[in-house]
Amino acid sequence: MATLGGIDLGDIQSEDQSKDSGLFQTPLPAADSDSAILIDIFGVFRTITVTGVITGVLATQTTFISSIEGIVNGSQSGSTFVSTTGNSYSVMVQNFSWTKAAADENKLSYTLTLFQGGL
């Protein structure tokens, strides 16, 4: 079970994580790529994207939306994200979007984009 700040994220459809080292890179004139200058000076950045489905009556869906939007309030201090793998990360929410399809009143699809950081 994945959670964000203790909020159950429901039925996770996918979890995508990328860790970018932010390398400084520059090619050398008249040289092949094996001569490029690579320097690890910018640090590392992790992005986590979670898509999921919340199943339940309208009140359950509204509570979920309000809870997540309560985190994304313009003055985030960070939350703990517990991954589907059980790993735990300190994160801030970059983006939260949700979709309600008329075909199924009891389902709410959403996407969360999280950035890891030392909070």
Image (cartoon, rainbow, N blue to C red):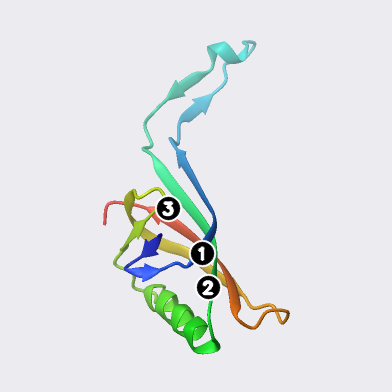
Q: Report the residue marked by disc 1.
A: 11
Determine whether the residue tagged by mark 1 lies in a helix, strand or loop.
strand
The quarter in which the C terminus is drawn is bottom left
Q: Rounded to the nearest whole Å, what is the CA distance between mark 1 and mark 2?
A: 6 Å
Q: Residue at x 73, y 79 (%)?
A: 103
What crowding class fits label 1: few (fewer than 14 Cα within 10 Å), some (14-19), or many (20 or more)?
A: some
Q: Residue at x 47, y 52 (%)?
A: 48
- Furthest residue to the left? 119
Q: Looking at the image, is mark 1 or mark 2 earlier in the sequence?
A: 1
Are the residues flagged by discs 1 and 2 in contact, CB closer than 8 Å? yes
Determine whether the residue tagged by mark 3 lies in a helix, strand or loop.
loop
Q: Residue at x 65, y 11 (%)?
A: 30
Q: Residue at x 36, y 31 (%)?
A: 41
Image height of 118 relative to 74, above or below? above
User: Residue 117, which numbered label?
Assistant: none
Residue 38 appears left or right of 118: right
The quarter in which the N terminus is drawn is bottom left
Residue type of the residue flagged with mark 3: Thr
Residue 57 appears left or right of 44: right
Q: Rounded to the nearest whole Å, what is the CA distance between mark 3 and mark 1?
A: 10 Å
What crowding class fits label 3: few (fewer than 14 Cα within 10 Å), some (14-19), or many (20 or more)?
A: some
Residue type of the residue flagged with mark 2: Ile
Q: Looking at the image, is mark 3 or mark 2 earlier in the sequence?
A: 2
Q: Position of residue 94 (x, y in %)?
A: 46, 62
Q: Report the residue marked by disc 2.
A: 54
Image height of 97 relative to 67, above or below? above
Residue type of the residue flagged with mark 1: Asp
Q: Report the residue marked by disc 3.
A: 84
Q: Position of residue 27 (x, y in %)?
A: 57, 20
